Structure formats: C-alpha cells, structure tokens
Image (spheres, helix red, strand yellow):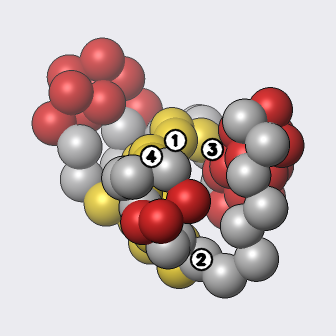
Amino acid sequence: MIFIRTYQFNYDRKIDGYGEIQFCAENYREAKRLFEDWAAENGYSIREYKMTVVYNKEDADEYENIYAL
C-alpha cells in the first residue's frame, strides 16, 4: 500500500518572505524532486534547507486512509 506524507522544507526566509513550503509525496525522493522543481520554476537558488515530515490536517483530511506520519 502507498502512503502519503507531508514533507516540510525550511530555508532562509529572505529567499521568498516565507522560509518554508510543504509538499505531499510518497517518499523523500519525490518530495525533494518537487521542492527542487518548485525552486527552479520560481528562480530560487536554495542550497541550504532542512526537510522534516510534519502533520498537516488539511492533507490528512484529503488523503484520509493513505495519509501517514
């Protein structure tokens, strides 16, 4: 069975005024690819970041049975 997790990426707030973004993905590799694609599409060069798995109620409600921590 496939499970979805919410991956949060924290980076320098000076880059976009937020300093964090979340992606739902099946695994670390997919989440990292989504993050790198997002950064490239927005013209951000983010070399240092921290990635953690977090709980997001909206994601849990959307994915229900396949949402995991």
Q: Amino acid at mark 3?
A: Glu
Disc 4 and disc 1 in contact, CB within 8 angstroms: yes
Figure quadrant of the C terminus: bottom left
When the figure is inspected, residue 61 is found, relative to residue 19, above or below; the finding is above
Residue at the spot of label 4: 22
Disc 4 and disc 3 in contact, CB within 8 angstroms: no
Residue placed most toward the observer, 31 or 26: 31
Which residue is rendered at x = 44% and y = 46% of the image? 22
Q: Secondary structure at mark 4?
A: strand
Left or right: residue 19 versus residue 41 is: left
Q: CA distance from mark 2 to mark 3?
A: 20 Å
Label at residue 49: 2
Which residue is rendered at x = 74% and y = 52% of the image? 44
Disc 2 and disc 1 in contact, CB within 8 angstroms: no
Label at residue 23: 1
When the figure is inspected, residue 42 is found, relative to residue 51, above or below; the finding is above
Earlier-in-chain disc, 2 versus 1: 1
Q: Secondary structure at mark 3?
A: loop
* Label 1 CA crowd tier, 10 Å (few <14, some 14–19, many 20+): some
Residue 30 seen in the figure: no
Q: CA distance from mark 3 to mark 1?
A: 10 Å
Q: Amino acid at mark 2?
A: Tyr
Q: Amino acid at mark 4?
A: Gln
Residue at the spot of label 3: 26
Q: Secondary structure at mark 1?
A: strand
